[in-house]
């Protein structure tokens, strides 16, 4: 990563003395209509340029050169001061844009008589409006957004655009133009969010929002811009980010994980069957059916799935991972974390053990759904003191899911509950080879100001990963709802990692960075959530070298076709599951013909129009 691109910073020739960059001969400008500001929870904005004193100072360190700008003297906020620093690294050519809160105590949560800070919006977005330009966005699996895309995109991101959630599986975005591009990597992503603004017809603006931690903006935040030359594309940015991640030591490959836990390798080639046990929707739930209350309860005995897996074995399905929902007495999404004992009506301990033993005898893998974030008020051991307390002293409250009213369990407490519950499962002889800890890698990170267990969002990452590490230490492959950069060192597989609804051009950015680190299953049919319109999950599973699902209730020809598709996926997975995806490309103008290439040389070409595929293995090339 040497600075061979001659990145420079200047204000010369820019309207109003705005900062411009030159990299690889291309000039990059911040949007001059954008006013960086501090936003308060009251709705008030404090624009940077409203400071009574703005002082610019040249910046030279042992790493590079740039400039510092100090802001102070704000009307009504006499003590408020902060600094912005832009430094061009002489070694890498990367540009660090750092916000330094020198004194923001007036805007902290506990400042008497003041509205506290909601977010700091800086730096302004870079502009990439040339014809042929596009943004590279890590919304779920990923998308490309041409600057002139005819539909509006990004008006409402999940979890308000917080990084570390499904809104941004990876903490970066970028833009590519005909003359070069950039990647913007957010260093303190756990306390960050971003906004995509793209009205119908464009242009696109992507900008960063720094969030307070524990009610205050108490430490410096950095966004790093990495420029790439003409001829680069989204694959270039993915490879650059993986290089950064490797240098920072975040990823652990599947080969490394398999060396610690043999069940990682056993997963490769499995089909996933996601099955139900007990469903109970409480009256306090948003899903409660008042008109037909009998529909709020459903029960499928464990014995049903015991017979089902025997049937599949007889049909030639010799690798399967069964994920069991609703196995606890309260029913699916009820009374967590007090989910034990197993549902008596479904078969209790005896029936669950029979299913577990049968899976082991058949050479299959068995895992259960569990939840250590949603904290239900009717859980027998519920204690409000264990809930995550927001910076304003309130407890988050929700009543959407089947179990009704809930808070969030502080993640600092989660590991102890995981240990409490799984030790009981192990003691009863339940043989688990995988387990799903719901929402951890999908929902936003939490913080807690309860003095008995304070936790920052950064510490929330550690707490969630500790739960994954506990499972790994007991030979259980950890899974969660989706995937995330912060979990890539611990997570083995997920429920899905598909495309966000309403995306522009779907593209597998996460797999281009981390395919060799995490196993991603795909729902097989067309029309499934997260599968782009006009395509099938089966072809996406092939294109991405991922796992496939087995329909739990399919019979006859539909089941036979599902098995046939799984066998194709299994063969591919045995070659590429632990390989990097080194390239993805569109082979025609309407992007219906696509190809992915893996580090062992395997090439997969899919035609979403004709619903066909071609797989070429290295020995056949």
Image (spheres, rainbow, N blue to C red):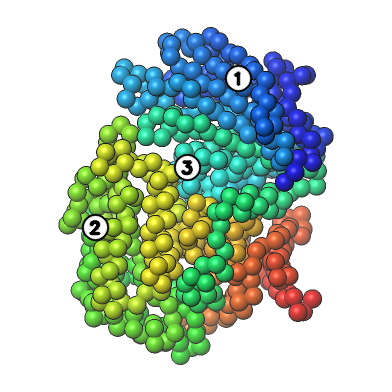
Q: Is residue 272 visible?
A: no
For the C terminus, the quadrant is bottom right
Q: Quick one: 69 or 329, which is closer to the camera? A: 69
Label 1, residues with CA under 10 Å away: few <14, some 14-19, many ≥20: some
Q: Quick one: 408 or 300, which is closer to the camera? A: 408
Residue 224: which quarter of the image? top right
State the residue at coordinates (47%, 75%). 263
Most extreme residue toward the front is 62
Q: Position of residue 194 (x, y in %)?
A: 53, 37
In the displayed structure, 487 sits above or below 520; it is above
Q: Which is more N-terminal, label 1 or label 3?
A: 1
Residue 532: which quarter of the image? bottom right
To which residue does mark 3 refer? 190
In the displayed structure, 513 sits above or below 575; it is above
To which residue does mark 1 refer? 69
Q: Which is more N-terminal, label 1 or label 2?
A: 1
Q: Which is more N-terminal, label 3 or label 2?
A: 3
Q: Position of residue 325 (x, y in %)?
A: 34, 67
Q: Is residue 560 visible?
A: yes
Inter-mark Cα distance, 2 to 1:
52 Å
Mark 2 or 3: the one toward you? 3
Mark 2 or 1: the one toward you? 1
Q: Which mark is residue 335?
A: 2
Q: Position of residue 280 (x, y in %)?
A: 25, 62
State the residue at coordinates (73%, 70%). 601
State the residue at coordinates (51%, 31%). 220
Label 3, residues with CA under 10 Å away: few <14, some 14-19, many ≥20: many
């Amino acid at each position: 990563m040497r600075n061979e691109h001659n990145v420079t910073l200047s204000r010369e020739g820019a309207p109003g003395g705005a900062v411009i960059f030159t990299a690889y001969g291309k000039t990059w400008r911040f949007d001059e209509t954008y006013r960086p500001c501090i936003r308060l929870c009251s709705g008030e904005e404090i624009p940077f340029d409203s400071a009574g004193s703005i002082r610019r100072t040249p910046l030279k360190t042992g790493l590079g050169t740039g400039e510092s700008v100090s802001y102070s003297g704000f009307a009504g906020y006499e003590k408020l001061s902060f600094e912005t620093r832009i430094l061009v690294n002489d070694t890498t050519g990367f540009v660090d844009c750092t916000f330094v809160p020198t004194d923001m105590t007036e805007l902290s949560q506990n400042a008497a008589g003041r509205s506290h800070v909601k977010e700091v919006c800086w730096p302004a977005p870079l502009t990439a409006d040339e014809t042929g330009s596009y943004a590279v966005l890590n919304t779920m699996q990923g998308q490309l957004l041409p600057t002139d895309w005819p539909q509006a995109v990004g008006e409402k991101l999940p979890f308000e655009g917080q990084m570390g959630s499904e809104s941004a599986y990876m903490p970066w975005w970028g833009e590519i133009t005909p003359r070069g591009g950039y990647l913007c990597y957010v260093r303190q992503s756990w306390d960050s969010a971003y906004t995509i603004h793209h009205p119908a017809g464009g242009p696109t603006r992507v900008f960063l929002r720094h969030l307070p931690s524990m009610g205050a903006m108490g430490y410096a935040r950095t966004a790093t811009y990495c420029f790439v030359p003409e001829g680069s594309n989204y694959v270039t940015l993915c490879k650059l980010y993986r290089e950064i991640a490797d240098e920072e030591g975040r990823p652990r490959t599947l080969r490394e994980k398999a060396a610690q836990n043999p069940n990682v390798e056993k997963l490769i080639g499995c089909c996933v069957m996601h099955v139900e046990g007990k469903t109970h929707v409480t009256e306090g739930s948003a899903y409660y059916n008042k008109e037909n209350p009998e529909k709020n309860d459903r029960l499928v005995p464990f014995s049903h799935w015991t017979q089902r897996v025997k049937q599949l074995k007889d049909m030639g399905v010799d690798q399967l991972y069964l994920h069991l929902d609703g196995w606890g007495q309260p029913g699916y999404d009820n009374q967590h974390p007090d989910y034990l004992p197993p549902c008596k009506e479904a078969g209790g301990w005896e029936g669950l053990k029979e299913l577990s033993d049968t899976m082991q005898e058949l050479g299959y893998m068995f895992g259960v759904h569990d939840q250590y974030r949603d904290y239900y008020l009717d859980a027998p051991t519920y204690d409000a003191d264990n809930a995550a307390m927001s910076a304003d002293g309130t407890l988050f409250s929700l009543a959407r899911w089947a179990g009704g009213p809930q808070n969030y369990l502080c993640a600092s407490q989660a590991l102890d509950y995981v240990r409490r519950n799984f030790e009981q499962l192990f003691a009863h002889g339940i043989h688990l080879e995988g387990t799903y800890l719901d929402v951890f890698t999908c929902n936003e990170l939490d913080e807690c100001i309860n003095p008995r267990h304070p936790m920052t969002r950064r510490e929330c990452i550690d707490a969630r990963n500790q739960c994954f590490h506990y499972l790994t230490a007991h030979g259980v492959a950890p899974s969660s709802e989706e995937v995330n950069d912060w979990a890539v060192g611990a997570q083995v597989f997920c429920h899905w990692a598909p495309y966000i609804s309403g995306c522009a051009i779907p593209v597998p950015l996460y797999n281009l960075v981390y395919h060799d680190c995490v196993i991603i299953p795909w729902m097989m049919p067309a029309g499934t959530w997260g599968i782009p319109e006009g395509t099938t999950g089966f072809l996406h599973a092939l294109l991405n070298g991922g796992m496939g699902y087995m329909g739990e209730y399919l019979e006859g020809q539909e089941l036979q076709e599902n098995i046939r598709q799984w066998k194709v996926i299994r063969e591919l997975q045995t070659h590429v599951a632990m390989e990097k995806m080194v390239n993805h490309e569109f082979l025609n103008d309407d992007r219906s013909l696509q190809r992915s290439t893996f580090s062992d040389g395997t090439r997969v070409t899919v035609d979403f129009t004709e619903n066909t595929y071609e797989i070429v293995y290295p020995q056949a090339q």
